[in-house]
Amino acid sequence: FKLGDFTTLTAELPVQLLLEGTTSNEAYTVFVQGPDSVKFGETANYRAKLQTVYQDASEPTTVEDVTSLVAWSKNTDGNISLTGAFTPAKPEPISLVSTISAVLTKSFGNGTTFNIQGSLDVTVLRMAVSSVLVDGPSRVKENKTADYTAKVVFMNGEINSNYSPINWSIL
């Protein structure tokens, strides 16, 4: 496509542009860099880099830090700051994958803009369980029932009474 054909364009990486009036063929890619896993209760820092490659080799490839220029997002509970710091929201019983995304809006003098998105899949590791608290009567008469509850205590001291699955058995 020609850049002048669009007012706004959102594209996955890499994006190649043929700028009107030039023979320069530029390819843009946004990379998200940082750890590929983070534990609940911890914060991981991510950076966004813009790589520009001149396909005709008229200029050298450039890489610039655009961390403060991108819009950050994630697809799981938690917070991601304007500087790329990601903190998962709460402990979960299983590990999960969160996609950390950075979108850079690039503008040209003719008023044309386009968005380049980069992303990184991050494994959010479950928090280790330190103990399970069981509450209920210590004895149950024959042919009677009793209710029991279980609470999971995580290594950071947080208690979760909605932890599932909990499988009960009688020993």
Image: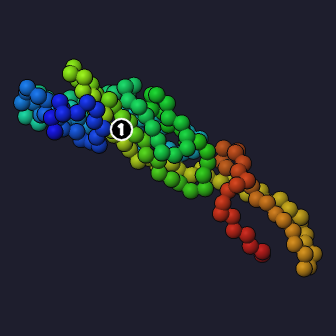
Name the residue beneath numbered marker 1. Answer: 32
Residue 57 visible in this rendered orientation of the protein: no
Up the image or down, 166 lies above or below 169; here it is: above
Residue 62 visible in this rendered orientation of the protein: yes
Up the image or down, 148 lies above or below 99; here it is: below
In the rendered structure, the answer to whether residue 37 lies left or right of residue 69 reads: right
Query: What colour-coding does the image apply?
Result: rainbow
Can you tell which quarter of the image residue 140 is in? bottom right
- Residue 7 in the image: x percent, y percent? 25, 30
Please identify the quadrant where the N terminus is shown: top left
Up the image or down, 108 lies above or below 33; here it is: above
Q: Which residue is drawn at 83% across and 59% down?
A: 135
Taking depth in this image into account, of 159 and 10 the one nearest to the observer is: 10
Q: Is label 1 in a helix, a strand or a loop? A: strand
In the rendered structure, the answer to whether residue 170 lies left or right of residue 27 reads: right
Taking depth in this image into account, of 151 and 99 the one nearest to the observer is: 99
Of all residues, the one furthest to the top in this rendering is: 109
Please identify the quadrant where the C terminus is shown: bottom right
Of all residues, the one furthest to the right in this rendering is: 141
In the rendered structure, the answer to whether residue 122 lies left or right of residue 88 reads: left
Taking depth in this image into account, of 20 and 100 the one nearest to the observer is: 20
- Residue 14 in the image: x percent, y percent? 24, 41
Q: How many labels does the image show?
A: 1
- Residue 152 in the image: x percent, y percent? 71, 54
Can you tell which quarter of the image residue 65 is in? top left
- Residue 5 in the image: x percent, y percent? 18, 33
Q: Which residue is drawn at 61% across and 56% down?
A: 93
In the rendered structure, the answer to whether residue 29 lies left or right of residue 138 reads: left
Kindly identify the amino acid type of the residue bearing the numbered disc 1.
Val
Q: Residue at x 84, y 65 (%)?
A: 147
Q: Which residue is drawn at 45% across and 28% down?
A: 83
Label 1 packing within 10 angstroms: few (<14), some (14-19), many (20+)? many
